[in-house]
Image: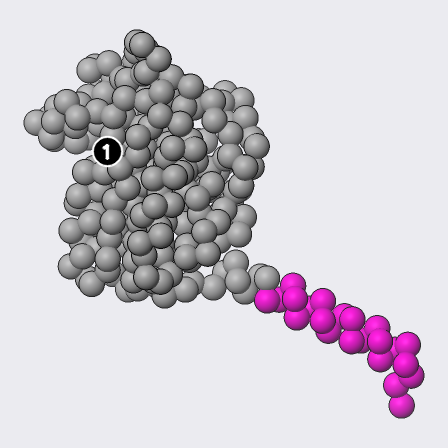
Amino acid sequence: MIDRRTFSTMLVAGVATSLFGRSSEAQAQTVSARNVVLVHGAYADGSCWSEVIGRLQRVGLKATAVQNPLTSLADDVAATRRILALQDGPTVLVGHSWAGTVISEAGVDPKVSALVYVAARAPDAGEDYAALAAKFPTPPATAGLVTSGGFAQLSEEAFLNDFAGGVDSARARVLYAVQGRIADTLFASRTTAAAWKLKPSWYAVSKQDRTTSPELERFLANRMHAKTIEVDASHLSLITHPQEITDLILNAAGCSS
């Protein structure tokens, strides 16, 4: 016969095991989602997701691109939350480049079932991301940042050769023409949350990236225990390798490609 003390110990242990097990399963479990919200980064706009959007739509997913104002982290998060509010169920939230910061903050929304980072920042809550990035090789595009009137953009040379490396020349020049200017204080922003600690996460590393250090991308992916792929692409893998990025998103949505 089990005495009361032994029974109590077993009961507590059982509850703890159940709770911890449930937590681990929540982290690992992929929730089926039919909605995808795509968030663009700095020096870009929502149209950069066009190739991915078409592929998602062809397999029956609802895809929506956010148009970030790039004026502050708070403004970009608010723009993303407005789009999330329109979704009718579990939603995969995807961020490219700077938008990794945005989805790390906005991704705590209960509708978000999974996070996908594409050559993206992924700061911890309150982290000085610039200090973290300084521990890794400085990417060439950094030298092409030009500021004026409180906003910043990439020079034409840096945009075409580094940011849009590998993109068809004519397409790259169009992207340069519609380049999103950022507030020159944007990158100093700090998040108050790290949604990747709470939601299943996926990461696409760009092996030829000249805008964000690939070594930094690998560090971030490893830190968040993301399901990771490496794409033989520069920073705009969502344009040059849209099928690989689409397949990653489908995986996060619990769909087969």
Determine which quarter of the picture holds residue 20. bottom right
- Say which residue appears at 35% left-offset and 13% top-offset: 150
Q: Is residue 255 left or right of residue 165?
A: right
**Number of labelled discs?**
1
Relative to 54, 129 lies left or right: right
Position of residue 256 relative to residue 204, above or below, is: below
Label 1 crowd (10 A; few <14 / some 14-19 / many >=20):
many
Residue drawn at x 25%, y 30% is 44
Q: Nearer the viewer, residue 248 or 36?
A: 36
Q: Is residue 25 magenta?
A: no
Q: Mark 1 highlights which residue?
A: 45
Please tell me whether the stretch drawn in magenta is mainly helix, strand or loop.
helix
Q: Is residue 240 visible?
A: no
Q: Is residue 17 magenta?
A: yes
Magenta stretch: give its range: 1-22
Quadrant into which the C terminus falls: bottom left
Which quarter of the image is occupied by the N terminus? bottom right
Find the residue positioned furthest to the left.
170
| Disc 1 element | loop
Question: Residue 207's spot in the image, x, y percent?
Answer: 33, 35
- The reply, left or right, for residue 71 in relation to residue 168 is right
- Identify the image quadrant of residue 34: bottom left
Measured along the vertical axis of the image, is residue 256 above or below residue 56?
Answer: below
Q: Amino acid at mark 1?
A: Asp
Residue 37 x %, y %? 31, 49
* Quarter location, residue 154: top left
Q: Position of residue 183 (x, y in %)?
A: 36, 20
Rendering coords of residue 56 (x, y %): 21, 55
Residue at (90, 81) in percent of width and height: 4
Can I make out residue 183 in this image? yes
